[in-house]
Image (tube, rainbow, N blue to C red):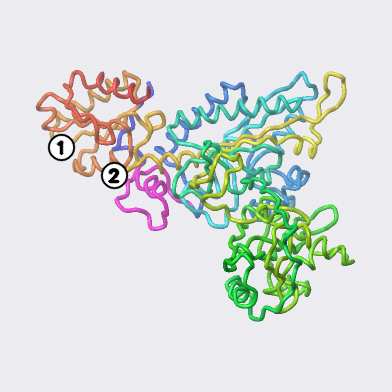
Amino acid sequence: MTSNTLRMSTLFLRTLREDPADADVDSAKLLQRAGYIRKAAPGIWTWLPLGLKVLNKIEAIIREEMASIDAQEVHFPALLPREPYEATHRWEEYGDNIFRLKDRHQADYLLAPTHEEMFTLLVKDMYSSYKDLPVTLYQIQTKYRDEFRPRAGLIRGREFVMKDAYSFSIDEEGLKKAYYDERGAYERVFQRLDLKYVPVFAMSGPMGGSASEEFLAPMPIGEDTFALAPSGKAWNVEALHTPELPEIDCSNTPAAEKRATPDAKTIDKMIERGNADKPRDDGREWQASDILKNVVIAVKHAEDADHDEPWREVIVVGVPGDRTVDMKRLEAQFAPAELEEANEEDLKKHPELVPGYIGPMVLGPQAKAAGVEDPIRYFVDAHVVKGSAWFTGADENEVDYYNLVYGRDFQADGTVEAVEVRHGDMSPDGSGPLSFERGVEIGQVFQLGLKYSKALDLKVLDQNGKAVPVWMGCYGIGVSRVLACIAETHHDERGLAWPTVIAPAQVHVVATGKNAEAFEAAEKLVAELEECGLEVIYDDRKKVSPGVKFKDAELIGVPVIAVAGRDTVNNGTIEVRDRNGENNVAVPVAEAADAIADRVKALLA
C-alpha cells in the first residue's frame, strides 16, 4: 500500500535559515529556503520532491479544467527543427530570445519557446474535413527562452513549465466560442488556486492574431504595468489606446512663424527663449506641453521579401514636450521589429535632421511634397491632434517655428501610441481617469485567426468541398510561474502558507521532545490521518529540537500543523493549529484525526 506520508527523517530536504544571496523576491527566497527548488544556473531550476508535489497539483487542476471544455492532451518534444519556424518567420522574429543549436550534421534546431507551428502541422497531418472540427489540443511542456537577465526566481526564467492549448475551428464564430471557453477555464483555474487575477486587454505581439487578453496577478514585483478604468476594465499599457481627441479649430491661429532661437536645444531652453522673445497672446507662459518634441527612432527589421538580411530604418515621432516616449508601447505597434533610440551613425546618414532643432517640415509627407525620394517616415503621438499649434524645430541650427499647426502646416504618415500613460489620463472606454497597478503575467489568450494556418497551409474541405484555412486560437498558462506567484502572495515572515488545494500535504505532524509516548501518539495520528485519505508530512526526527521543527513546519507552509509533545500527550491531547497561527486548540488524542480531517475539509470548501 502506498503511503501518503512524507517522513522528515528520510525526505530529500534541507531547509535554510538564511535567504540565498542572489534571491531577489520573496518567492525565490522562500522556495529555496523551504526546500522546494534549487538553482542549477541563472534562470534554470531543479525541482525537489516538495516542489514537484505542488507543481503536479497545479497541473492536475489545469487538466481537470481543460477536460471540462473537451480539450485533449498531447505532448511535443522541446527540441524542434528550424523549418516550421522559418515558414512563419519566427526563426528570425524571435531574435536573441530563442536557443538555437546545430546537430552533428549541421542541421538547425531550436529549444521551443512555444509550439504554434507544431500543433498546426499535427492537425494538418491528421485532419482534412470540416467534420473533424472543432478540436482543442493542449500540452503541459517545458519551454525555453534565452532571457537576457533572468530574475525573480521562477517568475522569469530561461526554462519554465507552460500549459499551451490551441483551438481549431472551421470559422471565426467557432474561434470565438473556443476563445471564451478557454478564457472561462482560466478563470476557474485561478479561482481554484486562490490566486488573484485581472484580465487585461493586451497586444498580440510576435504571436500575431487579433484579440488578446492577459491574465495578470497583481503584485508590486510585477514587470507589467496595467491600467484600470473606473468601469473595472483593464489594459496592458502597451495595448492602451488614447480616446480620440477632438479636432481644434485653428482658423484664428496666426500663420506659422520661423524665428531665431539661439541656445535652445532643450525643452527648458525653448521655454526660456519663448518667454523672453515671443510672449504668448493668451497671457500665460510657455510650457513643455506647447512644444512638439521630435524623437529620432531606429527600427530594426528582420529580413523580409525586399531585404535579404535584417535592416535598419530611421523614423521620427512627434510627441508633446511634457510627455516621455514609452519605447515598449511604441515598439508594440511596430512588432515584430525592435526599436531603439537612434545613434550618432543614424543621424550622420540623415543631415536633414539638425540635432536640437528637428521639426516635421523635412519629414514624411512634407518632404515627399518637396520632391524628396524615400523621405524619413514621420509619425505623431495620439495626443497631437488636428488643429493643434506647436512651438517646434525648423530644421535649421538655432531656428524654431512658432504656431506650426498639425493638419494645416504639416501632416504625418500615421498616428501612434508613443508616450507614457499617466495617472488621470482618460480610459479608452470613457468611464473616467485611469489608475495603475503592477502585475505578473500568469496566462494569455489569443485569437490567432488565420496567421499560422495560412503560413503552414492548414486547410480543410468545407461543406461545399472547398479547401479553406482553419481558424486558430492559442491559450497559455505559465505553470511554474503560477506556482511562484502563489508563493509570492501566500506567505508571511515565517515562511510559505500554501492554499490547501495545492500544498505538498494537508497536515504537518510534529513529534517533539525525547518522550517515547509523544512519538507513539504521533505515529498513531499519522496512521489515522492516512486512513482519512489525508497527505501528511511527519517530522519524526529524533535528535532535532522542537524550535527547529516548528520553524521548519512554518517555513514549509502546510495548512494544518499538529503537535504531539510531552506535555500535550501527558494531558491526553494533540495541539492543532492552522499554519497562520489561528484556531489553536488542544484536541483529545482519540478525536484528533477526525478533528483535523474536518478542518482540512473546511479549508478545501
Element on which disc 2 rests: loop
Mark 1 = which residue?
513
Is 223 above or below relative to 584?
Answer: below
* Quarter of the figure that contains the N terminus: top left
Q: Which label was assigned to residue 343?
A: none
Left or right of 246, for residue 531: left
Left or right of 433, for residue 90: right
Res 180 quadrant in image: top right
Res 301 quadrant in image: bottom right
Residue 412 pos. (x, y %): 77, 57
Is 153 above or below relative to 201?
Answer: below
Disc 2 packing (10 Å; few <14; some 14–19; many ≥20): some
Hey, what amino acid is under mark 2? Arg
Magenta highlight range: 13-40
* Quarter of the figure that contains the C terminus: top left
Q: Front-most of 94 and 330?
A: 330
Identify the residue at horizontal 50%, vertical 31% (top origin).
Answer: 59
* Mark 1 touches mark 2? (CB < 8 Å): no
> For the residues marked 1 and 2, what is the alpha-carbon distance in whole angstroms?
22 Å
Residue 234 pos. (x, y %): 55, 40
Q: Which label was assigned to residue 494?
A: 2
Element on which disc 1 rests: loop
Hey, what amino acid is under mark 1? Gly
